[in-house]
Image (cartoon, helix red, strand yellow):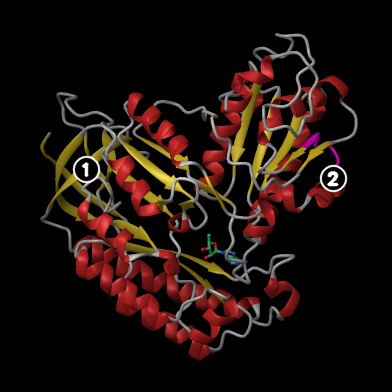
Amino acid sequence: MSTSASKSSAIRDPHAHDGGFNAMPEGEFEGKKVYIETYGCQMNLADSELMGGILAEDGFDSADAFEEADVILINTCAVRESAEERVFGRLSQLLQYKHDDPDLVLGVTGCMAENLREKIVDQAPYVDLVVGPDAYRRLPELVKQCMRENADPVIDVKLDQDEVYEGFSPKRKDGVGGWVSIQRGCDKFCTFCIVPFTRGRERAVPPSDVMRQCRNLAERDYKKVTLLGQTVNSYYHDETDTSFARLLDQIADIDGIERIRFTSPYPVDFTPELIDTIARRDEVCNYVHLPVQSASNDVLERMRRGYTIEEYEDLVERMRAKIPDIALSTDIIVGFPGETEEDFRETVDLMERIRFDFAYMFKYSEREKTYAEREMEDDIPDEVKGERLTQIIELQEEISREVCESRIGTVEEVLVEGESKRDPDDLSGRTDDFKNTVFPKPDDDSVEAGDFVDIEVHDCTSHTLLGEVVSS
Ligand code: 5AD
């Protein structure tokens, strides 16, 4: 389905799936500039590109800086309280720009929009637009409405079980790696997690549309695709009987796509077929982000994760047996309601046993509407949460550094992504197992973004391999 239908001038149901209404004279908003600022996960980054694409179809341009924009959209995350606080802070900063330019449209999109529409209107009444994750196809019309009327905030946070944005093309700059969302929403209802409430139920993007997007990346010379979903490996498309493993195989067959990564898989849905596919297909990266959250069975049960720690470790063992050089990372939450010292110890012990390549670690943050918020007391003092977090961060730093140190002396194939952020004389890229790698630009400029080069590693930090080109 193409959004070009929305270019027609008939007034139609704005909630229709065929692109909504558009009664404005053509061209009135042509060239208006939109700046999108993104908070949160990779799915949000991908959604920002999607919004950019949807708006571009209606003639909107993108602004490189918010100072140049006619429309600023803050694409938000609700997964932890700290993310929300940051957004409210940012909104009050942007208020100043609205004072200077009363025509500026300031919008909040994404998970906070879905979850906090009343609070946003209450605490930030200068916000013009609040749009939830399932309402992006109506964005052009909603933005135009704000530009025309400049009255009460325009709000559209309707969740839509069928919305997968089939047929849309995200607006992205040229690059080496691109995201493709293959699934939206989540059905797991982990007791700490707000996502099912902000993004609705799980649904799969049809394989034909996933393939269209991946082919489009390959045609634009992208080398790598990262498949996104809240529980990406539970992907299953009913009508075509396509499992996640089968989808990976199809994408790996596309000429030009040399690396495929996916995030985040859910441990329970990690099938033997999927392990086989990762082992069998060179294109599928030897790297899996496998959120464990806790190593205490009591805590896992109260989180309703659906696995025991023995099952999780068994999965890791089976993966490592089939793919010995696989890199693993994880998510860990400390201070979940009722987490005892003993529970926490078990998490520390697991980290020492598994030795993840890296980990994202968080203090439990109570989220409205979740089962844990309704039924459990957030009883671990913030100080204790903080101590536990510091302890595991320090432990993981040490492990990550040791993992990187073990690579000194090896030669790694690196997909070059571009100039290093720290030093324009250096290039950076990733190994097949997702290790960031930095090396000096060869003098003859023979290496550029998108190339595969062999790098001999001679040093490292805790998260980066340092080396030099030995061939290209
Ligand atoms: N508090 C702390 N961390 C959370 N996460 C999700 N919800 C919460 C919460 N309420 C973490 C989990 C998840 C990651 C994306 O964010 O570890 O895997």
Q: Which mark is residue 121?
A: 2
Residue found 25% across the figure and 60% down from its top: 276
- Residue placed most toward the observer, 459 or 352: 352
- Determine the residue located farthest toward the right in the rendered image: 151
**Which of the 4 quarters of the picture holds residue 136?**
top right
Residue found 75% across the figure and 19% down from its top: 22
Q: Is 4 located above or below residue 374 in the figure?
A: above
In the picture provided, is 31 more to the left or to the right than 324? right
- The CA distance from mark 2 to mark 1 is 47 Å
- Residue placed most toward the observer, 23 or 316: 23
Q: Is residue 128 magenta?
A: yes
Q: Which residue is mark 1?
A: 414
* Image quarter (top left, top right, bottom left or bottom right) of the N terminus: top right
**Which of the 4 quarters of the picture holds residue 81?**
bottom right
**Which of the 4 quarters of the picture holds residue 129?**
top right
Residue found 63% across the figure and 24% down from its top: 55
